[in-house]
Image (cartoon, grey):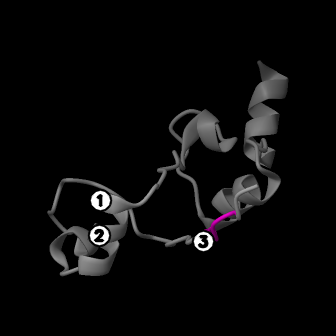
């Protein structure tokens, strides 16, 4: 049996991933370690708004929404999303 490798969950609040560099501090900064991890290591990007985050379409997410979904391991309908679903 092989020994499992360690895993790190690194949440960078407010660190959006975009190729647009206008007013985008992470894209403009010198980030060699982050760049190497994204290039060489396994990584994933999460959608942090709308139905994929348990929110109504077009609704922006926040730290609470993101951490709730990550902690649950699934999409958790937020209060506003639940109200919209009930009305539909």
Residue drawn where x is 27% and y is 69% of the image: 35
Q: CA distance from mark 2 to mark 3?
A: 15 Å
List the residue tagged with mark 2: 36
Tell me the SS state at disc 1. Answer: helix
The quadrant in which residue 33 appears is: bottom left
- Find disc 1 in the rendering and name its residue: 39
Crowdedness of circle 2 by 10 Å Cα count: few (<14), some, many (20+)? Answer: few
Instruction: Give the mark, 3 or 1, whose residue is nearer the N terminus.
Output: 3
Marks 2,1: beta carbons within 8 A = yes
**Residue at the image position 49 percent from the left and 51 percent from the top:** 44
The span picked out in magenta is 4-9
Under circle 2, the secondary element is: helix
Disc 3: which residue:
8
Could you tell which of marks 2 and 3 lies nearer the N-terminus?
Answer: 3
Q: Position of residue 41 (x, y in %)?
A: 41, 60
Spot occupied by residue 29 in the image (x, y as percentages of width and height): 19, 79
x%, y% of residue 15? 40, 69
Q: Quadrant of residue 40?
A: bottom left
Specify few, some or many for label 3: CA neighbours under 10 Å numbering under 14, 14-19, or 20 or more. Answer: few
- The one of 48 and 86 positioned closer to us in this rendering: 48
Secondary-structure class at tag 3: loop
In this view, the residue in front, 33 or 78, is: 33
Task: Report whether 49 appears left or right of 39.
Answer: right
Q: Which of the labelled discs sits on residue 17, or is there none? A: none
């Amino acid at each position: 049996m092989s020994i499992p490798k360690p895993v790190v969950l690194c949440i960078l609040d407010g660190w959006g991933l975009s190729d647009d560099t206008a007013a985008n501090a992470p894209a403009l900064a010198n980030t060699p370690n982050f760049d190497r991890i994204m290039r060489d290591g396994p990584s994933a990007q999460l959608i942090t708004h709308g139905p994929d985050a348990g929110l109504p379409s077009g609704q922006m997410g926040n730290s609470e929404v993101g951490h709730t979904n990550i902690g649950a391991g699934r999409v958790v309908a937020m209060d506003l999303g639940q109200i919209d679903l009930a009305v539909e």
